[in-house]
Amino acid sequence: MVGDTLLIALYAAIGAAAAGLTGAVALRLLRNRSVALSLAVVAAVTVAAMLAGTMLVSWAMFLSDHDLWVVTMVCAMAAVVSFAVALLLGRSVVKGSQALAEATRALGDDGSFVPPATAPTAELAHLSRQLAATSAKLTASRERERALEASRRELVAWISHDLRTPLAGLQAMTEALEDGMVDDPRVYHTRIRTEVERMTDMVSDLFELSRIQAGVLALTPTRMSVYDLVGDAIAGADALAREHRVRLVGAGVEQVPVEVDGREMSRVLANLLVNAIRRTPADGTVAVSARREADRVVLSVTDGCGGIAPEDLPRVFDTGWRGTDARTPPAGAGLGLAIVRGIVEAHKGRAAVSNVPGGCRFEVHLPAAV
């Protein structure tokens, strides 16, 4: 009895293996053809394996012609149904694949991707979702690139304008000096030095911004107190504040430690203070504060500029943004706040701005030192 069972299993295995090997060869030859054809081959292999094993076992058991005919008819019906189901499934998969391919072609043409309404398989549905997510990312990237390109064009126009004015003045003053038309050359020498310093500062800002945007800004973080950092910045901006008759207040500064590049962070505070002083009317106040919030240190500079238009708040830190003419500082190129954001983000922090009664508040959020 056991021997007969083993013999039947052997014959069935031989038949199934022969059908499976034939199917594997067929699938390899048809690997670049339609998935519907591959599904039909899989169905054919399944039925052929069953039929081959059954026929070999029937032959080994010496079934009668009638019984052999009955077994053959059953296998044939199973083959027909299997082929029909395989073809229907293959047609559905092919149709879904074609719809997905058409949608993907639109992604390559105009960047838009509209996923098909239905997907015949979970894999195609997953692929459709991934393509939709990729399309959204590409759309956002294109929007950022367009915004950056517009910002670059504005920056080039503003820089050209800001350089043209001092260069024209320098040319006029040098020609006057050459022609001996100046009673006191020292006055023109002072003006020339002032204009050269303005252009030098502008070039320095451009160089700093280019390093930030290229990701090559080298930082040397050291542990220091925010109190000392703010105190040095206020001392450096005191002369400008006196010139504009603006009062600097730094009473709300806590002595909390941070790990930052002292030179770069001093530039951040200097840019914020200069920006605030120039935009605050005479007899106004610029307040500086620093406090710890959980694992962050928040530095803030509050001015009396009168506020920023709500629609302009998202653009304040953009390269080249200078707002309205009333808020444009003398010889400003719109680089100071862009440099602030770049340096702060290089420190794993973030810069923010909000309106407050009578002015606006610029905040710098930095990781607190442990």
Image (cartoon, grey):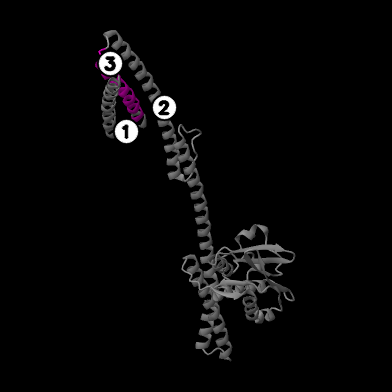
Relative to 155, residue 22 above or below? above
Q: Which residue is mark 1?
A: 33
- How far apart marks 1 and 3 lie (CA) works out to 36 Å
Tag 1: amino acid: Arg
Is the residue marked by circle 3 packed among few (<14), some (14-19), or many (20+) residues within 10 Å? some
Q: Nearer the viewer, mark 1 or mark 3?
A: 3
Q: Position of residue 165 (x, y in %)?
A: 55, 74
Q: Residue at x 51, y 47 (%)?
A: 136
**Which image quadrant for residue 370?**
bottom right
Q: Disc 2, disc 1: CB below 8 Å?
A: no
Is the residue marked by circle 2 packed among few (<14), some (14-19), or many (20+) residues within 10 Å? some
| Residue bounds of the magenta highlight | 38-62
Q: Quadrant of the N terminus?
A: top left
| SS assignment for the magenta stretch, majority | helix
Disc 2 secondary structure class: helix
Relative to 193, residue 106 above or below? above
Residue 195 lies in the magenta-colored region? no
Q: Earlier in the sequence, mark 1 or mark 3?
A: 1
Q: Position of residue 326 (x, y in %)?
A: 67, 68
Q: Residue at x 38, y 19 (%)?
A: 81
Q: Which residue is mark 2?
A: 89
Q: Nearer the viewer, mark 2 or mark 3?
A: 3
Q: Which residue is mark 3?
A: 58
Q: Which of 83 and 273 lies nearest the eye of the viewer?
A: 83
Relative to 169, residue 98 above or below? above
Disc 3 secondary structure class: helix
Q: Earlier in the sequence, mark 2 or mark 3?
A: 3
Q: Disc 1, disc 3: CB below 8 Å?
A: no
Tag 3: amino acid: Ser
